[in-house]
Image: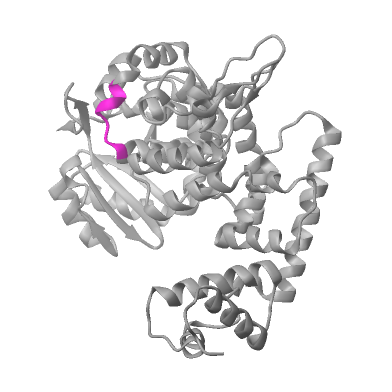
Amino acid sequence: MSTPKELASVLALAALEEKTPVIASLAQAYKEAGFTLALVGGPVRDAILGRLGNDLDFTTNARPDDSVKILKKWGEAVWETGAAFGTIAAKKHGASVEVTTYRSESYDPDSRKPAVDFGDSIEGDLARRDFTVNAMALELTGATPEFIDLFNGAEDLARKVLRTPGKATDSFSDDPLRMMRAGRFAAQLGFTLDTEIIDAIKSMNERLSIISAERIRDEFVKTIMSANPRLGLSVFVECGLADHFIPELPKLKLEIDEHHHHKDVYEHTLTVLDQAIALEDRLGGPNLVIRLAALLHDIGKPRTRELIPGGGVSFHHHEVVGSKMSKKRLKEMRFDSHTVDDVSHLVFLHLRFHGYGSGEWTDSAVRRYIRDAGDLLIHLHVLTRADCTTRNKRKADQLSATYDSLEVRIAELKEQEELDRIRPDLDGAAIMGILKIKPSPLVGQAYAFLLELRMEQGPLGPELAKEELLKWASDKELGVAK
């Protein structure tokens, strides 16, 4: 029977066959220049798992200046932006490659930037990698490809366990972001963490504070966009990492008393996230905005929690508070303004459906729902449906049926009234002509009045809209002649 290492070698080499022309030519270019080259890290792991992509990472004993010369002759385009860290990128025949000089890096206790030292051996380079499953390599410049696995990464891959090549505390001290990567790989690969890793993260999670917000955000996004973000988020919360970049999440763990009067909002949130992901096909596939909105939709609850006399608990206006908190948190994590605005708006709207009772929706209410959601209407559909986590099947079915009817109403009104392009029956020019006024704030007030009338009553037509506008002007004593 083959050992995990022997099997991994076979699988990795088989996965590389379809990319042989690109990889072989790159290896030959380095060999002719007198340097070594090895496929390393994630691509080796993914090759063994049968999911090798077009982004290939290599390591070499060539210094960055040498790699630039080699890659400019070999590739179609070359990027030197990572040269300070020993990495030169290139592209050829649709494949993207990054070639990094053997290196080691570590963080000064008070610095946000790692110090990079170049090494001379692949053994030293692999020893500094984050996890054993990422510390495997295929040396490509020998007579035949050689599978290198000094830390039993193949066995750990087969067992679905994350371990570090050396001491976990040393690894996380060298680069504290690796603590987040542990959660990310758990989410992406469905792996469990070795107890040494868990203990190390719990004991030194405060080291994450020296990492820049941008790097933390990128790792967080990779986690939440993974196949099973719950696993990674659980690592962040249980090991104390979340306290340093998204403290609102662990604060959702509200106490549950023996009568279950206090809901565990944290578990509810993870379930909403799972259910939103299950509905993402409506949004065209994995969607960062809906995942963030699902994760943050209830973060206003701890601040708004009030005990109700006689038992129970309320969270009045938590959607308003939560919207502001979401905006602040995402800005601090350096998300782009479009994502910040969309997520905070969805958090603000996530209870809107429940404000209309059990289905007594007027046409006016439907129009306002569509208007307020805007381009995020489908996102709001997904979030609202995902937010139903009751175990009462009858209640769940009733809520689903009620929302089904709302979506039908929305579709009907959108078709009848072209609500995607909803406008007042008179534009600004017509308002100025009828009221005989020049551009001014008054035009905006009149426009807002007609838009509100349009939302309330539906299309009026120009003549009736004109009558209503003149009545409005008369009530305001604007002195407009009819």
In the image, what residue occupies the spot 64% across and 32% down? Answer: 271
Q: Is residue 435 magenta?
A: no
Quadrant occupied by the C terminus: bottom right
Residue 212 is inside the magenta segment: yes
Q: Colour mode? A: one colour
Would you say 443 lies left or right of 311 here? left
Q: Which residue lies furthest to the top in this view?
A: 258
Q: Residue lying farthest left?
A: 65
What residue do we see at 41% from left, 16% from top?
197
Count of marks overlaid on the render: 0
User: Is 477 left, or right, of 26 in this rendering?
Assistant: right
Q: What stretch is highlighted in magenta?
A: 207-213
> Of 356 and 78, which appears nearest the observer?
356
Q: Residue at x 35, y 35 (%)?
A: 216
Residue 97, position in %: x, y? 33, 51
State the residue at coordinates (51%, 49%): 289
Q: Quadrant of residue 398?
A: top right
Give how far across and how far down residue 195 sits, in percent. Answer: 47, 11
Which secondary structure class fits the magenta region best? helix
Tell me the quadrant of the picture where the N terminus can be found. top right
Q: Is residue 199 visible?
A: yes
> Where is residue 313 shown, x and y percent of the image?
64, 22
Q: In this view, does 76 lie to the left or right of 9?
A: left
> Where does the image place residue 58, in percent across and percent down from the top left?
32, 43
Q: Considering only vertical position in the picture, is 97 above or below 456?
A: above
Outermost residue toward the right? 394
Q: Can residue 140 be seen in this view?
A: no
